[in-house]
C-alpha cells in the first residue's frame, strides 16, 4: 500500500554544512566558525568555510534535485548571514541569497521547507550569553520576523529549531559540539528552557508576519525505544518508558522537551527528579512555549530494543556483528515505526520525517559512478517501517532523506558521507549515487512497492 497521495518526498541539508562562503557578502561569524578553530575539536582541523560551496553552486544543486525528482527540499537559513551581529542591522545580501534559492526551487517545482535554526548561532549573541541568556527568545523572534517578512510570500512551510536536545546537550553539556561547554545540569536545563521559549516566540512571529497561510513546526530528534517482542505487555512497558524522564540521561528524555511544546507543562517526573536544578518558570512561559503547531518534524536514525526481564525492563544487546553504519550507528529500521507511533499516540500532531539516512563508505568507482547498495537497502528497510506506521493510522506527511549531498558532518568533518549526491570536496564535482536514482523510482511510485 503506497503512502497518501499528497505525501512529500524530499531531502534535507543545513546551512553551515553545505553553504560555505563563511566570510562573504556581509555574513557574520557563528559559533561553528569559532569552534572549528579550536584545536582538536574537529577531525583533522576541518571547517565549513567552503563545504559544498552551495552558496555559489545552488543552481547546479537544484538541477540535481530536479534530476532526482524531489518534491520538497528542507534547508536551513544561516542566522549570521541575515543578522551578522545576531540582532540589529539586517544584511540584505544574505536575504538576497535565500531569495534566489527559494525562487529557483519554486521554478523547479520543488516546495521549500525552511528551518530557521540549525545550530549556527551568531557569535555575537553567544558572546552575550547565547542560550543561557533569556533575551535570546526575543532575538530569535526578531530574526524570524525578518526572514518571514522577506520570504513568507513564497515559503509556506517553516520549522523553528533543529534538534534542540542536540545543540544544547552536545553544545552545553558534553562539549562535543559548538560552543563546546560542559556545564552543570542546572545551566543545561536553563539553556533548554530558553530555547523552548525561543521556539514559542518564533512560532508567534511566523504566524504574525507571514502574508499568507503557512504551516509551522519544528524538527526535534528522537532515539526510539522499541519492544524486542510485540506482546501487549512489552509494548505497554516500552511506551511507558518512552514517555518517562530517564534519570541516567535526563536532558535527552523526549518528554522533557516535547511535553512543554505539545501539552504546556514539564513532565512531573522530570520536575521531581531535577528539583532545584529545574529552570525557573516565569508567568506566561508555558503558554508561550505551547504554541499550536501544524506538524512536527522527527529526525530519526537509530533506536534501542527493550525486553521484559525478571527484574523489569532490560536493554537488548545487539548481536555480535550486528549491522552498523559507517558512523557505527545501529541499523534499526523499526525506529521508523515505533518512533512515529509512540509520538503520535501521545501528541496527536502530524509528522514529517525531517531526517533519516546513513553514513556509508562511498567513493567514485572505476566506471565513474558511485555504488552505494547499503544505503539503498538501509532506506528500503526504514521506509517499509514508516509505511507500516502510516497504514496503522499515524499521520505521516512526508520523508526527507538526510542528506541531499555529502557535506561537513560537524565534529566528524568530511569523513562521513551521508548524501544521495557524492561531493568531491577538492574539485566540488557532484555525482549522483545509485541511491539517488533508486530514490527517484521510490518517489515515482510513492513508496516502496
Image (cartoon, rainbow, N blue to C red):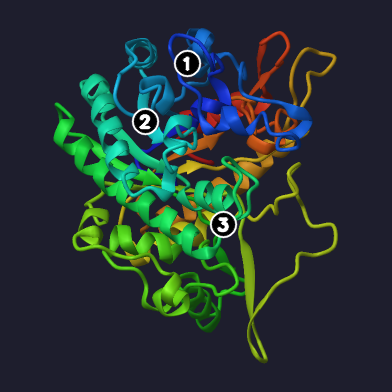
Disc number placed over residue 66 in the picture, else none: 1
Pointer 3 residue: 183
Disc 3 and disc 1: Cα gap in Å?
Answer: 45 Å
Quarter of the image for residue 255 reads bottom left
Q: Is residue 43 visible?
A: yes
Percent x, y for residue 141? 27, 38
Q: CA distance from mark 2 to mark 3?
A: 33 Å
Between the C-alphas of marks 2 and 1, the distance is 16 Å
Residue at 45% x, 17% y: name it. 27
Residues 237 and 142: in front is 142
Instruction: Give the residue pinned by disc 2.
Output: 113
Q: Which of pointers 2 and 1 lies earlier in the amino acid sequence?
A: 1
- Dot 3 lies on which element? loop
Q: Position of residue 432 (x, y in %)?
A: 64, 18
- 301 left or right of 369 in image: left
Mark 2, other Cα within 10 Å: few <14 / some 14–19 / many ≥20: many
Amino acid at each position: 500500500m503506497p503512502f497518501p497521495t499528497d505525501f512529500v518526498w524530499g531531502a534535507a541539508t543545513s546551512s553551515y554544512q553545505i553553504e560555505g562562503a563563511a566570510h562573504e557578502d556581509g555574513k557574520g561569524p557563528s559559533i561553528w566558525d569559532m569552534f572549528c578553530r579550536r584545536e582538536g575539536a574537529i577531525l583533522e582541523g576541518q571547517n565549513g568555510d567552503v563545504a559544498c560551496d552551495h552558496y555559489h553552486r545552488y543552481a547546479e544543486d537544484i538541477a540535481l534535485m530536479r534530476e532526482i525528482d524531489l518534491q520538497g527540499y528542507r534547508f536551513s537559513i544561516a542566522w549570521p548571514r541575515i543578522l551578522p551581529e545576531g540582532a540589529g542591522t539586517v544584511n540584505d545580501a544574505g536575504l538576497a541569497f535565500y531569495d534566489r534559492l527559494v525562487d529557483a526551487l519554486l521554478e523547479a517545482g520543488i516546495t521549500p521547507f525552511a528551518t530557521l535554526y540549525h545550530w549556527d548561532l551568531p557569535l555575537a549573541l553567544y558572546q552575550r550569553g547565547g542560550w543561557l541568556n533569556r533575551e535570546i527568545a526575543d532575538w530569535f523572534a526578531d530574526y524570524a520576523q525578518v526572514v518571514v517578512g522577506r520570504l513568507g510570500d513564497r515559503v509556506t512551510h517553516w520549522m523553528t529549531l533543529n534538534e534542540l536536545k542536540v545543540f544544547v546537550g552536545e553544545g552545553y553539556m558534553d562539549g562535543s559540539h559548538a560552543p563546546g561547554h560542559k556545564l552543570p545540569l542546572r545551566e543545561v536545563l536553563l539553556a533548554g528552557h530558553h530555547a523552548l521559549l525561543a521556539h514559542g516566540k518564533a512560532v508567534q512571529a511566523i504566524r504574525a508576519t507571514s502574508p499568507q497561510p503557512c504551516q509551522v513546526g519544528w524538527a526535534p530528534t528522537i532515539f526510539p525505544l522499541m519492544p524486542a517482542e510485540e506482546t501487549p505487555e512489552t509494548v505497554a512497558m516500552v511506551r511507558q518508558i518512552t514517555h518517562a524522564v530517564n534519570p541516567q540521561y535526563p536532558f535527552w528524555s523526549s518528554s522533557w522537551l516535547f511535553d512543554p511544546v505539545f501539552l504546556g507543562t514539564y513532565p512531573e517526573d522530570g520536575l521531581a527528579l531535577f528539583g532545584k536544578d529545574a529552570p525557573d518558570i516565569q508567568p506566561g512561559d508555558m503558554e508561550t512555549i505551547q504554541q499550536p503547531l501544524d506538524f512536527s518534524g522527527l529526525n530519526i536514525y537509530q533506536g534501542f530494543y527493550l525486553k521484559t526481564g525478571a527484574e523489569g525492563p532490560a536493554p537488548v544487546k545487539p548481536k555480535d556483528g550486528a549491522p552498523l553504519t559507517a558512523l557505527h550507528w545501529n541499523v534499526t529500521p523499526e525506529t521508523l515505526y515505533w518512533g512515529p507511533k509512540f509520538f503520535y499516540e501521545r501528541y496527536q500532531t502530524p509528522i514529517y520525517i525531517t531526517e533519516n539516512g546513513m553514513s556509508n563508505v562511498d567513493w567514485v568507482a572505476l566506471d565513474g559512478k558511485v555504488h552505494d547498495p547499503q544505503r539503498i537497502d538501509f532506506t528500503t528497510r526504514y521506509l517499509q517501517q514508516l509505511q507500516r506506521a502510516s497504514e496503522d493510522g499515524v499521520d505521516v506527511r512526508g520523508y526527507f532523506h538526510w542528506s541531499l549531498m555529502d557535506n561537513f558532518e560537524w565534529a566528524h568533518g568530511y569523513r562521513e558521507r551521508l548524501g544521495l549526491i557524492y561531493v568531491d570536496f577538492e574539485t566540488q564535482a557532484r555525482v549522483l549515487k545509485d541511491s539517488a536514482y533508486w530514490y527517484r523510482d521510490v518517489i515515482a511510485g510513492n513508496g516502496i512497492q
